[in-house]
Image (tube, rainbow, N blue to C red):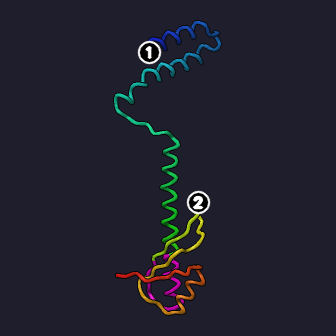
Amino acid sequence: MSVCMAAVIASLADILAPREHQKYIRVLLGFLILTVILSPLPKVKKIKFEPIENQTLENTKILSDNISVKLKENVEADIFERIKGEFGVICDADVLLDIDDEHKIRGVKRIALSKKIPENALERLKEVYGCDRIEYKVK
């Protein structure tokens, strides 16, 4: 029924259009008829189209999660290198970062170290990262 109505409208528009605009109107009406013909296709195939804003929000969330993970890994690697370079101790770290909406580090909330380090190394980590909560991982 909708295909027939679109064809009737297309014919009337073609007849009523001035000659210099007929080729443009035919192209537009061709797209209209094609759209009407293809409109039931998603229902037949059971294709569900998500609104673009939902996809954008999902993509943004995935991207921000990836950025947060990368920031965490960089801080952990920096702590490892700092302890190894300044104090000669090999010690892995796990950090909990305070990251704002713009993906900037506001601070380090917690540092969990894989083994005990000297007291002066603890003080240095507190000084550099501004974190008072330094603990040791229990294995």
Amino acid marked by disc 1: Val
Q: Quadrant of residue 28?
A: top right
Q: Residues within 10 Å of mark 2 (few under 14, many from 20)?
A: few
Q: Quadrant of residue 126?
A: bottom right
Give above or below for 99 relative to 39.
Answer: below
Q: What is the magenta segment's predominant secondary structure?
A: helix
Q: Quadrant of the C terminus?
A: bottom left
Residue 87 horizontal/vertical position (percent): 51, 91
Question: How far is the residue under mark 2 from the one under mark 1?
Answer: 49 Å
Q: Residue at x 58, y 72 (%)?
A: 107
Q: Which residue is mark 2?
A: 101
- Check disc 2 and report its element: helix, strand or loop: loop
State the extent of the magenta-drawn residues as a range: 76-93
Q: Residues within 10 Å of mark 1 (few under 14, many from 20)?
A: some
Front residue of 38/118: it is: 118
Q: Residue at x 49, y 78 (%)?
A: 111
Number of numbered discs present? 2
Q: Quadrant of the N terminus?
A: top left
Amino acid marked by disc 2: Asp
Residue 18 horizontal/vertical position (percent): 64, 9
Q: Residue at x 56, y 79 (%)?
A: 131
| Residue 3, numbered circle | 1
